[in-house]
Image (cartoon, rainbow, N blue to C red):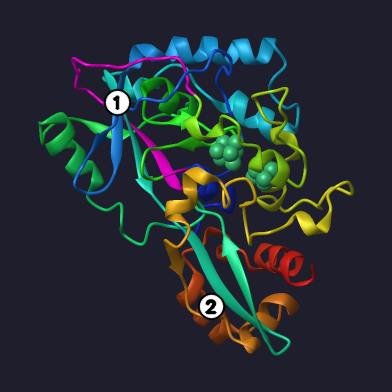
Amino acid sequence: MMNSGESRRSFLGKLSAAGAALYLGPGMGLARAETHAGLMDMGYKYTISSVDCLPKLKTDMERLVERQKISEHATIQEYVDAFTYELPEEQSWGKSFVIVAIPNKIVQVDFHYKGEKRRVLVAPGYTASGGRWDGIQEHIKEHVIGDKDAKLEYGPFIPQKLLAARSGLGVYGRNNIIYVPEFGSYHALLTYVTDHEFERQPWRNPQMLRECEGCDLCYENCPNKCITAENFVIDAGRCVTLYNEQDADMPDWMDPQAHNALVGCLLCTIECPANLHRIDDLDIMEDITEEETDMILTGAENEALKASIEAKIGRIGLVADFGFLARNLKLLLER
Ligand code: SF4
Ligand code: SF4
């Protein structure tokens, strides 16, 4: 899925994982969730929205900025600035968005290290699909649009978590992650633009996950206190994901024990009651041998071992950059 010339950052961005903690939507006046999503036999869910929603998303965002709900961290600001609220000229034919959620899984890999087997997890969203998404555009045209000749392309860079909440595809958890019925929070969001106009286009206030009422597990488990009872919008500028997705040094204030995944963070989702049914649904990859683990950690050049590692765990986006992989693996193995 990743081209050789494509940076890890852009790869992660495409997977909707980078800056995963961005909430990007109003958090007040939330009601119980009722989904309007359709379930397709391919196992994805979708909702639709007119492209006329873009100014409404812009208003939502401006309101958040005015209320100083968005972290001032430079990377978060980069994402916010990069969002667009107009179709680009080359997609000016667009009439509707099809917002899709595809279930994904926590990845599990055992690294052999100093005579022990160390189990390492990767948060969902950092792994290439391995072909699971192939054919989805044709499927959408045939079964959602009902016209094989309709135009359908990836949409522009818009706040798709917010669009997912507004269009009824999912609801916000208190950890600001979108929960989709049946999938929980373990899914990838994709937004397509089409020239087809749909009759039914739901639009609603963002809603909160029913299970959040009376639950404080994610507040308690967040190592960086990003989630608080006072603010629905979490402090994304302190989120572990923001730091282990980047090459920059870890901030001094972060406890090394906070790292819990090879990339991403699982601490506000793994014990969430709305994810319990997904917890054994793992993407288990082949063990990394002692020799391979040593090569990653020492940075030794060994093309045969690199090829072997890539064959086993190359679907994890960060494996494209062995220096970055070594940094994150050390954070876990030396805890
Ligand atoms: S852990 Fe509890 S409060 Fe947090 S998202 Fe899940 S249900 Fe909501
Ligand atoms: S538990 Fe991890 S992913 Fe969740 S908000 Fe805290 S640091 Fe971010």
Residue 115 picture location, percent across and down: 70, 90
Q: Position of residue 270 (x, y in %)?
A: 57, 52
Query: Where's ligand 1: which quadrant?
Result: top right
Callout 1: few (<14), some (14-19), or many (20+) C-alpha neighbours within 10 Å? some
Q: Residue at x 18, y 14 (%)?
A: 199
Which mark is on residue 36?
1
Q: Is residue 22 left or right of residue 172?
A: right
Per the image, the residue denoted by label 2 is 309
Split into 4 quadrants, where in the image is the C terminus? bottom right
The stretch of residues the image draws in magenta is 184-207
Quarter where residue 113 is shown: bottom right
Tell me which label, 1 or 2, sits earlier in the chain. Answer: 1
x 63%, y 15%: residue: 64
Disc 2, SS? helix
Q: How many marks?
A: 2
Residue at the image position 75 percent from the left and 32 percent from the top: 73
User: Which of 61/75 is in front?
Assistant: 61
Under mark 1, the amino acid is His
